[in-house]
């Protein structure tokens, strides 16, 4: 089914991607008077930031900023939000674009109050992608505690459908519609902002680092979810093999980054992410020894440099300059031996630890899924802005690896570029 969404191309902006960059652009444009269509493929807004335990520079939880942004979106009638949606086609030129959007069925309508009675009776389970597969949810689920929109969604693959129907029976609000179908809408906009974000690099592709082979090797995003109070372990940092707090942890930097066989570029935030995650471990496991294996440590800016200096003063944190060659599991206790050559002393190091965290890099989502528009893209999948042509702009980690602060600043600037297209039309 196709619907036409009435809009004035001269005063409308499409933002593709509901992560922190997309949210910022949408809000900046709408709050100065422009109509915004915000499209997000996930069933919730917030992107990767929503999955973090804390983020720089204040080491505060993402709920701080996201809660405010969600409220601003909810209160602004100029912002039209579409989740579980994808852009299929873009035609036209700066000032006048025709866009087709597919809306995938949620199977839960706006009557949902997120009471949770449906999950109590649902017999089917699915791997929880929000928690990086570290736990399970029911087939009908709330993506995370403060998800926006705050309503449940059904995984159509896991759901047993109308043959079960238990969720329908207990729902007092007629919020569940298992016959909901995919539909498309057509809109007209004057400019488009691509905030398509990033995904963690697939660590199973890095053969020598053991992810997927050894249970006590996790990724940095898995550590973020593990440390979060609403995560799979309720904030307890533990070894997957035995659910015990590790007495020693190794961080392996540049896991897949700066490697011509994987991601040839530096992912910018990985060093600071590992330094941040050492604070998680030190707070909850004060006796734990931490080993950070690195090629070069990047702490961009004075504030980050001070944070790095503070971590270096901790006697329980050991920095080893050397690229990790391999990891070996001890089958008797599931400990991991990290093998590297110390670039300073030239000595070969074999450090046994109880858990390893791989600092996997940031891969632009465009590298994984091509966009239906005429855009400039690098070999690595990053979007390149063509300011001379104008009309369509890329922001945030769709253009290069960035932290949250840089993404917000960039998104604000690109909101002005998108508005300028409308004004100059």
Image: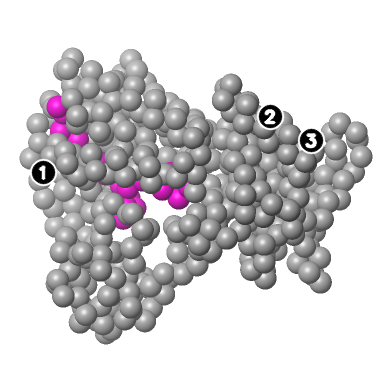
Q: Which residues are magenta?
A: 33-52
Measured from the top left, where is residue 366 in percent x and y?
Answer: 43, 40
Element under disc 3: strand
Within 10 Å of disc 2 (Cα), the crowding (few <14, some 14-19, many 20+) is few
Can residue 190 be seen here? The reply is no
Q: Is residue 272 left or right of residue 353?
A: left
Q: Name the spot of residue 231 as percent of width and height, x first.
A: 48, 59
Q: Nearer the viewer, mark 1 or mark 2?
A: 2
Label 1 or label 2, whichever comes before in sequence order = 1
Any part of residue 355 in sight = yes
Q: CA distance from mark 3 to mark 1?
A: 56 Å
Q: Is residue 290 above or below residue 306?
A: below
Q: Left or right? Give the position of 340 relative to 38.
A: right
> Residue 362 lies in magenta, yes or no?
no
Determine the image quadrant of residue 421: top left
Q: Residues within 10 Å of mark 1 (few under 14, many from 20)?
A: few
Q: Return the residue found at the far bottom.
A: 163
From the top left corner, tell me how far across and down residue 329 is, in percent: 78, 62
- Residue at numbered disc 1: 5
Q: Secondary structure at mark 1?
A: loop
User: Where does label 2 land, which residue?
Assistant: 309
- At label 3, counting other C-alpha atoms closer than 10 Å, the crowd grade (few under 14, some 14-19, many 20 or more) is some
Q: Secondary structure at mark 2?
A: helix
Task: Report the residue marked by disc 3.
Answer: 321
Towards the viewer: 310 or 216: 310
386 over 337 or under it: above or below: above
The one of 229 and 425 positioned closer to us in this rendering: 229
Q: Choose the circle earlier in sequence order: 2 or 3.
A: 2
The residue depicted at 62 percent of the width and 49 percent of the height is 283
Q: Closer to the observer: label 3 or label 1?
A: 3
Distance between mark 1 and mark 2 Cα atoms: 54 Å
Q: Is residue 388 above or below residue 168?
A: above
């Amino acid at each position: 089914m196709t619907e036409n969404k009435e809009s004035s191309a001269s005063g409308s902006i499409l933002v593709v991607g509901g992560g922190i960059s997309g949210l910022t652009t949408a809000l900046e444009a709408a709050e100065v008077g422009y109509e915004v269509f915000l499209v997000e493929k996930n069933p919730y807004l917030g992107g990767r930031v929503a999955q973090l335990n804390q983020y720089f520079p204040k080491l505060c939880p993402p709920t701080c900023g996201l809660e405010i942004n969600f409220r601003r979106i909810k209160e602004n009638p100029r912002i039209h939000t579409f989740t579980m949606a994808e852009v299929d086609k873009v035609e036209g030129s700066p000032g006048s674009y025709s866009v087709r959007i597919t809306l995938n069925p949620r199977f839960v309508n706006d009557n949902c109050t997120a009471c949770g009675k449906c999950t109590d009776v649902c017999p089917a389970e699915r791997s929880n992608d929000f928690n990086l597969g570290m736990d399970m949810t029911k087939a009908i689920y709330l993506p995370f505690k403060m998800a926006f929109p705050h309503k449940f969604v059904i995984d159509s693959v896991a759901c047993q459908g109308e043959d079960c129907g238990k969720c329908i029976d207990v729902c007092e609000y007629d919020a569940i519609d298992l016959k909901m179908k995919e539909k498309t809408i057509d809109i007209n906009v004057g400019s488009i902002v691509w905030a398509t974000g990033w995904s963690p690099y697939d660590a199973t592709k890095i053969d020598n680092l053991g992810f997927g082979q050894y249970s006590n090797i996790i990724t940095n995003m898995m550590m973020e979810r593990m440390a979060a109070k609403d995560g799979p372990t309720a904030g307890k940092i533990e070894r997957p093999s035995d659910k015990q707090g590790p007495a020693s942890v190794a961080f392996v930097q540049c896991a897949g980054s700066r490697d011509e066989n994987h991601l040839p570029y530096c992912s910018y935030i990985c060093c600071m992410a590992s330094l941040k995650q050492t604070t998680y471990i030190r707070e909850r496991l004060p006796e734990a020894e931490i080993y950070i294996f690195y090629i070069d440590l990047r702490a961009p800016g004075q504030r980050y440099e001070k944070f790095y200096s503070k971590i270096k003063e901790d006697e329980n944190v050991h920095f080893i300059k050397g690229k990790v060659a391999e990891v070996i599991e001890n089958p008797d206790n599931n400990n991991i031996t990290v093998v590297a050559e110390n670039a300073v002393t030239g000595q070969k190091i074999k450090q046994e630890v109880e858990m390893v965290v791989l600092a996997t890099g940031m891969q632009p989502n465009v590298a994984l899924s091509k966009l239906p528009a005429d855009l400039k893209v690098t070999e690595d999948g990053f979007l390149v802005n063509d300011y001379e042509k104008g009309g369509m702009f890329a922001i945030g980690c769709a253009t290069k690896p960035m932290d949250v602060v840089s993404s917000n600043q960039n998104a604000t600037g690109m909101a002005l570029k998108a508005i300028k297209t409308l004004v100059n039309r």
